[in-house]
Amino acid sequence: MPITPRDREILRLAVPAFGALVAEPLFLLADYAIVGHGLGTTAVGALGVAGTVLTTLVNLCVFLAYGTTASVARQTGAGNHARAMRSGVDGIWLALGIGAALIAVFWPLAPAVVELFGANAGQSAQAVTYLRISLLGAPGMLVVLAGTGVLRGLQDTLTPLVVAVGSFALNAALNGWFVLVLDWGIAGSAWGTVLAQTLGAAVYLVVVARGARRLGTSLLPGAAGLKEAGAAGFALLIRTVCLRVVLLAATVIATRMGEAELAAYAIATQVWTLLAFALDAIAIAGQAITGRSLGAGDVATTRDATRRMTQWGLWSGSALGLLVIAARPVLPGVFDADPAVTELLLALMWPVAVFQPVCGIVFVLDGVLIGAGDQRYLAWAGVWTTLAYLPAALFASGFGVVALWCALGVWMIARLITLARRSAGTAWLVTGA
């Protein structure tokens, strides 16, 4: 099939976004590989628990990226460039404030939060160490989210790619040095990630500040803008809470199955996350294109782009599923998994691969509706799909970690149904600034 102008626009945004999104889970994948080789299975399990907590806290604030992308893109499509940048600056200030609050609240609560997972004493101690150090990087992580949202809304996905690749390379180098050379243990892995994320945030601050000065936008926070950014993100927060409830419930169940099960599930989760971020590249294009086209009042372009991006999601998901099957035999060796973990990990890769085509469509439609500002529907859909998942997960808990992963497939199918039904209607096609 020939590449159309619509395909070229999608690829122009999605290909750099793909690189940037893949780099993000590679932060933790690099940690798992280095920790697995240098510290062993207990440390890998501890990293799985702490990484889940940290990822949950950061992902609850993903509205800083998604909401900013949608609002900046819509204002850009309507020709309101100064208002677009104002939204971005306020989003960054909101990110800094939330990051500081996360440190203040969760530093003292770290032992209690880790204890909720039911890990053994060795895993718990290392998980608390990793979590507390990593919290120091929370403001930087959230600034990266907000800054990325600004640039995506301005139809620039290349700069986030450059920053992400640089941060990943620095993260891998620092982690290897701190853990394998200086022998700092799991704390070294945490410090490497903190430093890399903070430097990445500094780059975004410089880029956004330059853009704001060109448009005459003040760099000081505005009370009205902060309130608007917070209100716009509330529905997305509910949606994200629902997503994290699903993943947290699965991690808790896997933790209680045993050390090998937890380690295998943690590694499989990082592989799945890597694939999810890769598929989300098309969703990022969906957010930017949908926001811009609806801001310009062009419903026909929105419909056409949605149809084409859904096709790209299906094709990409199918290709990634085949890639997982091909890479399956070598994955345990990458993480230096022991025999028990290897057996479970090999089995888990089958459901990971099978559900990739479903994931491809789900992520695209999710991105399109976010770009349209249809957050209220997404919040309600998140509640219903979570309610569909929890009984399946509880039932699967009696049949092992592979059955637990299949329950995640039930969840993805429920998301597919709710998103496809909404996108087929017209209620989300709201035009104008």
Image: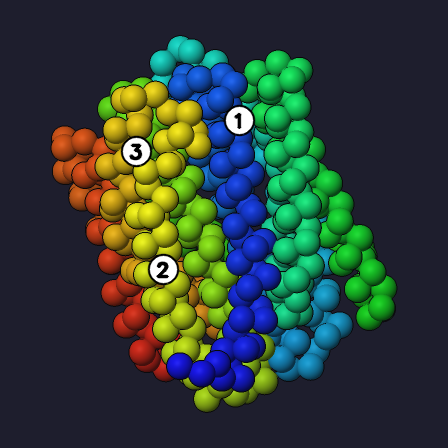
What distance separates the C-alpha of mark 2 from that of mark 1?
28 Å
Residue 232: tell me if it is visible: no
Q: Is residue 74 above or below residue 213?
A: below
Q: Is residue 246 above or below residue 361?
A: above
Q: Residue at x 59, y 85 (%)?
A: 296
Task: State the residue position of label 3.
Answer: 345
- At label 3, the amino acid type is Leu
Instruction: Using a 10 Å C-alpha cutoff, classify the residue at mark 3 as few (fewer than 14 neighbours), some (14 to 19) or many (20 or more).
Output: many
Q: Earlier in the sequence, mark 3 or mark 2?
A: 2
Q: Residue at x 61, y 51 (%)?
A: 145
Image quadrant in which you'd find residue 397? top left
Q: Is residue 191 above or below residue 153?
A: above
**393 to the left or right of 339:** left
What distance separates the C-alpha of mark 1 from that of mark 3?
18 Å
Q: Residue at x 48, y 30 (%)?
A: 32
Task: State the residue position of label 2.
Answer: 319
- At label 1, the amino acid type is Ile
